[in-house]
Image (spheres, rainbow, N blue to C red):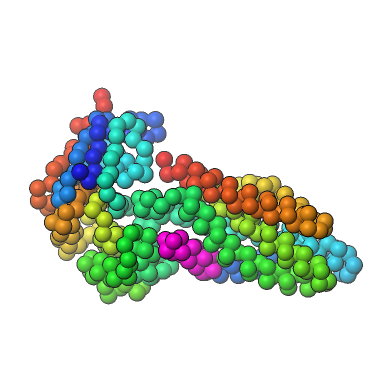
Amino acid sequence: MILSLTRVACARGGRLLFAGVSLDLAPGEAMIVTGPNGIGKSSLLRVAAGLLAPFDGIVVRSAPVALMTDDLALDAERTLADVLTFWARLDRGGAARERVAAAIETVGLSPIAGIPVRLLSTGQRRRAALARVLASQVPLWLLDEPGNGLDSAGLAMLEQVIARHRAGGGAVVLTTHQPLSVPGARTLALDERVPA
Amino acid sequence: MSAAWTLIARDVRRGYAGGGAGLVCGFFLLAVILFPFAIGPDRMMLARIGAGAIWVAALLAALLPVDRLVAPDCESGWFDQVAVRGLSLPLVMLLRIVAHWLAFAPPLMLAALVASGLFGLDGAAVLRVELGLLLGTPGLAALAVATGALTAGLRGAGAVAGLLLLPLALPLLIFGAGDDGMGGAKLLAALSLLLVTGAPWLAAAAIRSVRD
């Protein structure tokens, strides 16, 4: 198992968001977390990433994690290639420049790899965040609304990238409000785990 | 080791980018120049208060970058990305202190040379001021990073940072500006060491509490 949650509960601001969430994710598997706004989908991903301590239950990760959220965390004044290389250097493994160049190519940002991040549009920022996930080359991806702001070509690219990652033995947990085609993905409906 | 180098290089670059270091030096020199205007052009008097004035100006200048040291990275989710990569947060904060010192102390010590000239300090006094700054600025950098972490996400963080940092920097000022030979320098170095070892833990705890 790459990721294993056992009866996990999450509380924010003194309120119990969800409880009794269990999931096991093996290599090649994908899980789509659904539910209305504010149900705790992002919090579940943060718990899985180890950024939030679960209120109850056990979280076990057996592999490094790549996390993609709304927060871009790319220095606005530096060029896309430089700032992605910075993060790739913090990931394990060498050849950061080459990994980043390949990732930028995959998400279709090669023509603008040399411009500062502050000039990127919303969709380009999402692609940049996805490129950071790709360049990290870790088995477990946690993607929070990865399709937000992407055009139809971007969504197709996203589906393709996820499929390739799973084919290579990776696992994905993602939240989405868009209809994303992730063949064979299991669904976790978080609104069924809200304590009465 | 290469991760440490990557983090330091990024923060040093940020420190010098956008004229950050120049701003600190400019502010420091302006603050120093105020003293002769306020006190009058009495050479003896200026030479006597010179070291103290330089230290007061250095403390005030140390406040300037505080709100840029940690808060932007808290807002942009930068620390989340660091955390998922399994890097130790106190270690990251220690590296940030090192980087801030590299971006803050050398320009300030150069500007202090100019300020020493303005006050007409003699060679021995200049050496004492520079040695004091060399030993005291690591402590100041640690305080600045810790204060920046504690005030990250607060409204009016700049004013709160001043209220927090200046009292804590008072011991540095006392031993830095004091004229009591090597004893004072040793105490100053000890204080700096204490601040540099303590501040990373404090800053990391503050950032974790913002994250939750």
Instruction: Decide if residue A166 is on the left or right side of residue A194.
Output: left
Report the residue at 38% width, 69% height from top. A82
Work out which quarter of the rendered image holds the N terminus of chain B and state it. bottom left
* Quadrant assignment, res B176: bottom right
Find the residue positioned furthest to the left. Answer: A184
Residue at point 25% right, 66% down? Answer: A103
Residue A36 visible somewhere in the drawing: no
> Is A45 situated left or right of A23 in this image?
right
- The answer to whether residue B186 is seen in the rendering is yes
Does A168 lie within the magenta span?
no
In front here: B97 or B13? B97
Q: Which residues are magenta?
A: B1-18
Q: Position of residue A150 (x, y in %)?
A: 23, 59
Comparing A139 with B205, the one in front is A139
For image coordinates 73% across by 55% down, the residue present is: B186
Quarter of the picture holding the C terminus of chain B: top left
Q: Residue at x 37, y 63 (%)?
A: A89
* Total count of labels: 0
Which percent across, then down, holds residue B64?
A: 61, 59
User: Image height check: is B181 above or below A114?
Assistant: above
In magenta stretch: residue B6: yes
Residue nearest the observer in this picture, B180 or A177: B180
What secondary structure is the magenta-colored segment mainly?
A: helix
Q: Where B157 falls versus A36 (above or below)?
A: below
B199 relative to A82 in the view: left or right:
right
Pinpoint residue A113: horizontal percent, then vertical percent.
31, 72
**Residue B152, position in %: x, y?**
51, 49
